[in-house]
Amino acid sequence: MSRLVSLVLLAGLSTPAFAASFTVDPIHTRVGFAVGHMMVTTVRGEFGGVSGSVEFDPTNLPATKVTAEIDANSVDTRYADRDTHLKSPDFFDVATSPSLKFVSKSVKNVGKDGSFELVGDLTIRGITKEVTLKVAPFSAEYKDPWGNVKVGTRAVGVVNRKDFGMVWNKSLDSGGYLVGEEVQIELDVELKKN
């Protein structure tokens, strides 16, 4: 009996064995961000609406392709007034730019553990800039109770909000500014195999 259990566990822990196409699972994916506030703390938020696709081959990581689209109107920082301001022309300007888009261009610095840096074009407010995301090794493939094959990964990066035209700020009486310029990107991604 223990041998059977071991075989089942090993089968569940196998990594993706060949090139495959995946779709972002929006319910189990978190697109988060963090930015300095008043030079004393960090405010975190996330976007609730995300879609995308990934082409992934563990034997050829440089061939990885990613596209993603994020609903700018779904921004949530747990404070309605701040979210309204973030949707305004001072920041995401959702009336004229309802989505953020990412399209990968290349993979570099592939690690022995399967981690890599994903380089791509990020478009916010109609402004496109190249960004680099550090991507953790993809998980093993697992089948959920409904028969869907899933994998997951995590990615992080940093952007300067001013590069995308988000220049609004307020100076503080004690010096410094209300909102930091650097924004940390934090992605926890679950993918469904097509």
Image: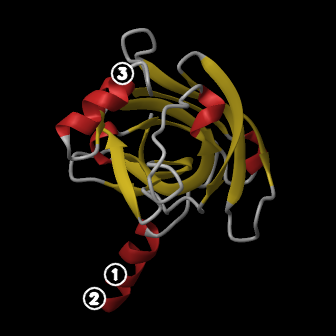
Quadrant where the C terminus sits is: top left
43 over 120 or under it: above or below? below
Relative placement, left or right, of 79 versus 116 is: left
Q: Residue at x 20, y 44 (%)?
A: 79
Label 3 environment density (alpha carbons within 10 Å; few <14, some 14–19, many ≥20): some
Asked which colour scheme the image uses, the reply is secondary structure
Labels 3 & 1 near each other (Cβ < 8 A): no
Residue 112 lies in quadrant: bottom right
Q: Are marks 3 and 2 in contact (CB under 8 Å)?
A: no
Residue that badge 3 annotates:
88
Residues at discs 1 and 2 in contact (Cβ within 8 Å)? yes
Residue placed most toward the observer, 174 or 120 = 174
Badge 1 local density, few (<14 within 10 Å), some, or many (20+)?
few
Amino acid residing under circle 2: Met
* Residue 81 in the image: above or below residue 90: below
Q: Earlier in the sequence, mark 3 or mark 2?
A: 2
SS of the residue under disc 1: helix
Q: What residue sits 27% from the left and 38% below the top?
A: 82
Question: Is residue 45 toward the left or the right of residue 170 in the image?
Answer: left
| Mark 3–mark 2 distance (CA, rounded to whole Å) | 61 Å
Q: Which residue is mark 1?
A: 4
